Image: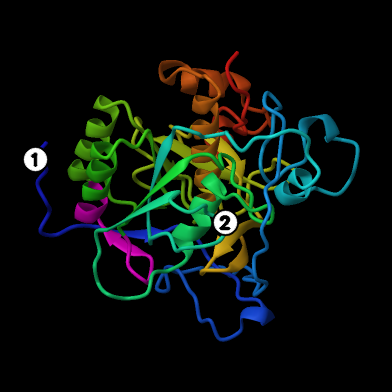
Amino acid sequence: MPFPLSSLPEQHCVHDVIVIGAGAAGMGVALCASAEGARVLLVESTPLLGGTSALSAGTTWVPGTRHAAEVGQADSIETAESFLSRAIGDRTAWGKGIKVAVLDTGVKDHPTFASGQVTHIDLVNDGKPMHSHGTSVASLIAGQDERVPGVAPGAEILDIRVANDKGYSVTSVLAQGILEAVNRGARIINISMGGYDDSAMLRQAVAYAQQKGAFIVAAAGNESYDQLAYPAAIEQVVSVASVDGQNKQAYFSNSGKNLDFAAPGVGLSTAWETNMVATASGTSQSAGVVSGIMAANLSLGVRAPDLLRQMQRDARATGAPTTQVGSGVARVTGRR
């Protein structure tokens, strides 16, 4: 399908802010450097270790929170990785047969990904080192290491680099990335970036993806606005906000109509650089979690036409307005 490119595209800023820990002093990472109110999250310098976590099929699990059966049994909030480290069963097939495109800053070769699990496409081609934001998001979708467990470790990642080393992209490249993802067979397209100008070009790309049966998942934004960023604000896009470990809206998470789901987005362990772990927060991470949940549910037998309706029914209610959490906190439940 021919798609016109814009000569004066809007800018899209990756939703995330990184904290640099003492162990990573001197790394100098910063996303959206020119954005006001940037926040910093810890980046650890600990090398990643091998291993695979397990969770029994059919069990309900929300990454970043305690297991549903344990809620109310302890005051402290258990992280996803600590829960998975002692979980029972095998979830390595979650996401198997599902291709998830990650439109971001690129996905680096990291030990959390299996050999051949990630296919790389670079639409930026600027010759500069990739920012690790895309690696962080992709690890939440399909990471295989117990320290940075992805929701759907069996999924295939289609890495489409659309943002530069500063975390910026333009509408024309983002739209091109959507078309590339659809034409290469992606069932789910994760976009952990956005801006606040509507775009006919972007809407056309979203419509093309919907026509071909692909789901687009996008971050709501980290500016505490009562407005979703684009493309999350487009009705056909699965928009995702952030909650903390107590299922309360994260202080940075945008609110707004058309919000579909919330997911953990505070203090999640993710892959970083080529062998490190970063504790990251943001609706970028929440979108990655929801993309992983969708991939897992599809691989567990949920039919694509039923996927969003079932996820809406199964979402964990928080009591917050739908403008803050949508249908609730998304969960893996499998076929009903």
Whether residues under marks 2 and 1 lie with C-beta atoms below 8 angstroms apart, the answer is: no
State the SS at label 2: loop
Secondary structure beneath dot 1 equals loop
Q: Is residue 269 left or right of residue 199?
A: right
Residue 170 image offset from top left, x and y in percent: 25, 58
Give above or below for 184 relative to 192. Answer: above
Question: The N terminus lies in which quarter of the figure?
Answer: top left
Amino acid at the residue labelled 2: Thr
Residue 173, percent from left and from top: 22, 55
Above or below, 164 relative to 293: below
Residue at 48 percent across and 73 percent down: it is 30
Q: Which mark is residue 102?
A: none
- Going by the image, does 202 lie left or right of 285? left
The disc, 2 or 1, on the residue closer to the chain's N-terminal end is 1
Foreground disc of the pair 2, 1: 2
Residue at horizontal 24 percent and vertical 67 percent from the top: 125
Give the farthest residue toward the bottom. Answer: 26
Task: Determine whether 264 is above or below 266 in the image.
Answer: above
Residue 238 visible in rendering: yes
Q: Amino acid at mark 1?
A: Pro
Which one is nearer the viewer's eye here, 233 or 97?
Answer: 97
Q: Quadrant of residue 235?
A: top left
Mark 2, residue position = 112
Q: Which residue is mark 1?
A: 2
Which of the pair 243/166 is nearer the observer? 166
Instruction: Work out whether 187 lies above or below 243.
Output: above
Provide residue 139's location: percent of width, then percent of height.
Answer: 54, 53
